[in-house]
Image (cartoon, helix red, strand yellow):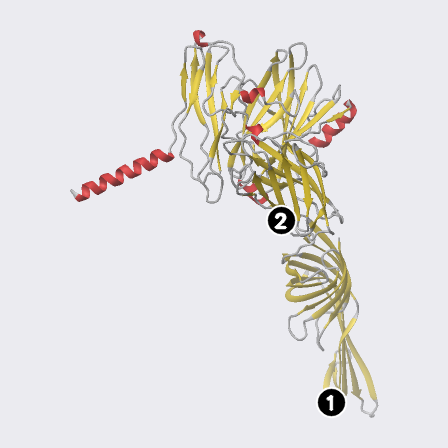
Amino acid sequence: MKYVTTIYCLFVFYINAFAQHADSAIVATPDSSKAFSFSIKLPALTQIPGAPEPFYTYLWDFGDGHFSMSEKPEHIYAKADTYDVYLYAVNNYDDGKKPQRKKQKVNVSKNQAGAATASVAEENFFKANDMFELKYNSMAKPNDTMVLIAGWKNTDLQPTEGTLYLMLNEKQFEQTCFDTSGFRAYGNAAGLTALSGADKIPPLQSSLLITESGSPASNFPTVLSAAEGSAALSTTLALYKNVYASRLESAPTGEAKFSFLQLHVTPEMIKDTNATLTITGVYVPDRGKPVMHKLSVPVVNSHDPNKMNIKGGRIGYRFLKKYKPLDYKIRFQNNGKGPARKIALDITMAPVLDPQSIKVKDMHPFCPPCDSAAIEKRGCWELLKNDSGALFTFHGIYLKGTHQKGVEDLDSTKGFMEFEIVTKKKLEKKPFKSRTAIYFDKNEPVITNYATGRFKKSLSSIIMAGYEKAFGDNRISSDGLVTGFGVAPLAPYLPYWQAEFYYKAGITTQVVNTSFDRVGTIFIDSLKRNFEYNRFDSMQENNISQLKLIPIQLRHNINNFISVGVGAVVTADISGSIQTRKSYQLLSPNGVNLPYTVADKQTLKSFSNWKARPFFDLQIGKVKLGPHLGLRYYYNGKNKSFGYFYAGWRL
C-alpha cells in the first residue's frame, strides 16, 4: 500500500507540473452581438532572479487584416468566411521558452458577420506618420521568432492601391539576420516577391517622407524631393541583401490595412547580441506620396524591453578617426501597475568615450529641457554629466504601466532616450562596453545589458621587402633580395594568424672557398693520363631564386610598437644555378707547376628542391597599422639556416 501511495503522489505531481507549463488551444466564443471573444491558457511564468515581475504580451492576428494586443480581445468579422486566427505571445522577464505560435480556424456565418471594428492597437498604430509604419511584437532573439507588423492607410480622397517594399538583412552584418526561407504573408496582403539585382523600384514621382521608430517612434521626420527621395531609396537598397515587394489591394479612403510577417532570427546573430538591426519598408501608393519607414530592432539575449544599444551594428575600423561620434539608444518600459512620473537613466560609459561630449538627440516621452532656475521641475528633462557617464532624468512626466488598468496600447508604456557621444581618442580595435541603470520613480533600478561596441571583421594587406642572408660555411642557399606581401586581420589586439608569399631574386654568392697543400693524383681525360698535383683549390657560387610561402604564422602584438611571431616557411627553387670550380697545381716532369681548372655548372629546375623550415620573427615600429622593421630567423641546421632583414607596411 505504501508503494501504491508513493506512485500515486508522483503521478499527481508530474501531471500538475505538466499542466502548469503546458498551454491549451485558442478558444473562440461568439456572442449575441456578433463579436467573437478569444482566449487561451498559456504556461505559468517563472521570474528571472533579480528581474521585474514577468508578464505576457500578445499579438492576435484575426486572419482578416485586423489585429489586437489585448490579452482577451473581441472582434467582429465583416464577411462570412473561414479565417485562420494566430496568436503570438511573448514571455517578458520569463526564465522559460517563448510559446510557439498558436493557430485556430474560425467559421463565421452570415448571421455572425457585421461591421468590423478596429482594436485599440490598430487605432494607435500610426504614430511615426499617418500613412505607413512597421512595428515588431518582440525584439530579435537569436534562434527565435518575431513578427513584423506592416500597416498602411489610404489618405487619398479615392480608393487606391499601392506597392509595399521590404528590405531585410543588412550587408554590414556578415551573418544573415533573418531566415526568410519560411517567409509568408498573412491577412489581406498579396504574397511577397523577391526582387533580383535586375529588378528596380521605379523612380518616385513625388516627395518622399522618411520616418523612423524603434517602438516608440522618433520625433524628427525627413521630407525629400522626388529626385532626392529616389537617390535615397537607391542608396538604402544597396545596404541590404534581400528586398521583397508585395502588391497591395485597393483600400477605401481613411481605411488602414495590416499584414503580419513571421521572421526567424538566425542562431548566428548571437555573435551580434547588443547590435541594432534595421528593417526598412517603403509604401508607394498609386495616388499620393510615398513613405519610407525605418524600424530599429535590437538583438537581445532575452525578452527584456529595457535595453541599451549602440546604433550602427559593427564599426568599420579602417576609416575610424579620432573623436568619432557614436549614437546610443536606451529603451525602457514601465511594467508597473501604475504610471511612472520620474524616470532616471544612470548611464555608465566605456572609458574610451568622453561623457562631457554627450548630446541628447531624441526621446520619448518628448519634452523640453528643464529650466535650471526653476524651483520645481515638471514635464522636462535634465542631463548631469560626470567623469564616468551621465544621469538623464525625466521630471514630471506620465508613462503608463503595462499592468495599469485599461492600458491596451503597449507603446504608451515604452520610452527611449537617444544621444551622441564622442571618443576620447582613436579607438583600439577591441570591444568597449557601456550600460544603464533605469529607475522608475523610487523603485529599485533595472540594470540593462552591456551595450558593446565592436568592429567589423576586415583584412589588412602587408607589403614587405628586404635582404636575405644565408648562414654557414657550406650553406646550400644564396643571398637575395626578397619582396612579397601578406594578409592578416586589420589592427588585431589578440594573437592572430597571418599568411605571406614572397619572391627571392638570388644574388651570386660565394659559399665555399677551400685550399689544401697536399699531394694527389687526377686523371685528365683529354690527355688520357694521370697527373700528380701538390695543391688543390675549390670554390662554389650559388645564385638561386625562390618562391616562399608561409601558409601559417601565429603572431602577437605585445603593444603598439613590438610584435613577435612564429611559423613555418615552404620554399621552392624556381631558377638559378650552382657553379663549382676546382683548381689543381700539376707537377710536370721538368719540375714546373702547371695550373689546371675544372668547372661544373648545375642549372636548377623550376619548382624543385621543396623545403620546409620553422622561423621566429620580431618586428619593431607601427606593428598594428603602418611602417615597421623586421628581423626573421629561419632554422634548419647549421648550413641550411638563413636570416631575413626587411621593412614592411601594414595597410
Farthest top residue? 111
Front of the two marks 1 and 2: 2
Farthest front residue? 375
Q: Nearer the viewer, residue 173 or 114?
A: 114
Eyeballing the image, is 161 above or below 514? above
The residue positioned 58% from the left and 36% from the top of the image is 332
Sequence-wise, which precedes: disc 1 or disc 2? Answer: 2
Image coordinates of residue 416 in percent, x first then y, are 62, 35
Image coordinates of residue 549 in percent, x first then y, are 68, 59
**Disc 1 secondary structure class:** loop
The residue positioned 38% from the left and 35% from the top of the image is 21
How would you rate the neighbour count of disc 1 (Cα within 10 Å): few for under 14, some for 14-19, many for 20 or more? few
Image coordinates of residue 270 in percent, x first then y, are 55, 43
Residue underneath mark 1:
518
Q: Report how far apart the C-alphas of labels 1 and 2 lie in the structure.
A: 79 Å
Q: Is residue 410 visible?
A: yes
The residue positioned 54% from the left and 16% from the top of the image is 118
Q: Nearer the viewer, residue 247 or 95?
A: 95
| Residue type indicated by callout 1 | Arg
The quadrant in which residue 641 appears is bottom right
Residue underneath mark 2:
433
Image coordinates of residue 384 in percent, x first then y, are 68, 44
Tag count: 2
Q: Nearer the viewer, residue 487 or 505?
A: 487
**Disc 2 secondary structure class:** strand
| Residue type indicated by callout 2 | Lys
How would you rate the neighbour count of disc 2 (Cα within 10 Å): few for under 14, some for 14-19, many for 20 or more? some
